[in-house]
Amino acid sequence: MTKNLDSEGLQSIAENYDLFYIDLWGVIHNGIKLHEGAIFTLKKLLEINKNFVLLTNAPRPIQPVKEFLKKMGLDEKFRDKVFTSGEAALNYLKKFYSLKRFYHIGPPRDFDLFNDFRSNKSKEIDKCQYFLCTGLFDDYDQDLNYYKNLLENHIGKKMICTNPDLIVDKGNRRELCAGSVAMVFEKMGGEVVYFGKPYPEVYNQSIDNKDKKILSIGDNLNTDIKGANLLNYDSLLISNGVHKDEIRDNGIEKISKQYESIVNFMQSDLIW
């Protein structure tokens, strides 16, 4: 049974945990502006000496995300808590793929992810050794059939996906993410290596989490909550996120069962 914390706030359970993994997009901001209640919650967590990681499936290294958050107005003491799926992927690529040629699937703004080995970028899909998927091309950001056609003759190559999210809401606009392209590739028989929630590597790289009582907070059942479940963390779902309409129409118990996830707590928005 999921407990609703809208009336009691996070403060009612905060002392029970040593570490909090808190999603950025959908919890701390909506891609356009910060959520004031969530920022106040971060302040209160620091006041009671609780540690947290702002863990995001952004397909970029940490620094560009920090700069994005700075422009949005997020204080430096919070920006220093950021860890990204892109950073986890970059560490892996440097170790195992630094000399291999890749074909980039995603927008040009994600170039900073592979800046250190940009000379290995192949303009021709036939000449690459693997795919690096950070998102969708700007000209085909809603057309998954394009990627099916693009990749159908190359399923023998491995894909590195730096953002397992399927969708994200930017303000009132829903956008597809790299995970949607990776799902198309997998359904065709291709192999995908994912970096980001719900996969353990991104949690383990972000901070020393051994022997800690952990609460994972996010708005996505497929990533934030599923990741908590896989790692045996407690979970808190922000219901005004990507599943807002589903939860409104069917209720949290039915939706969490549909997504094969366990939601311990929920809030409409992150509030203290």
Image (cartoon, rainbow, N blue to C red):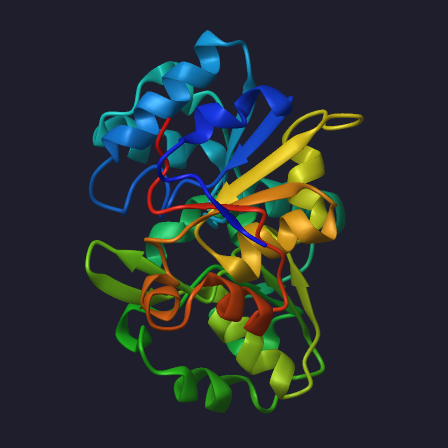
Instruction: Name the residue nearer the viewer: 71 or 259.
Output: 259
Location of the N terminus by quadrant is bottom right
- Residue in the picture at 57% in, 30% down: 20
Vertical placement of 268 versus 64: above or below? below
Percent across and percent down for residue 5 are 43, 39
Instruction: Name the residue nearer the viewer: 243 or 54.
Output: 243
Residue 118 visible from this viewpoint: yes
- Residue in the picture at 28% in, 30% down: 37
- Residue in the picture at 54% in, 29% down: 53
Vertical placement of 140 versus 271: above or below? below
Whether residue 214 sits left or right of residue 30 in the image: it is right
- Residue in the picture at 51% in, 41% down: 217
Vertical placement of 1 versus 236: above or below? below
Percent across and percent down for residue 156 are 72, 82
Location of the C terminus by quadrant is top left
Residue 4 quadrant: top left
Residue 212 quadrant: top right
Residue furthest out toward the right: 211
Whether residue 235 sits left or right of residue 204 in the image: it is left
Count the labels in the image: 0
Whether residue 83 sits left or right of residue 26 in the image: it is right
Percent across and percent down for residue 80 are 46, 20
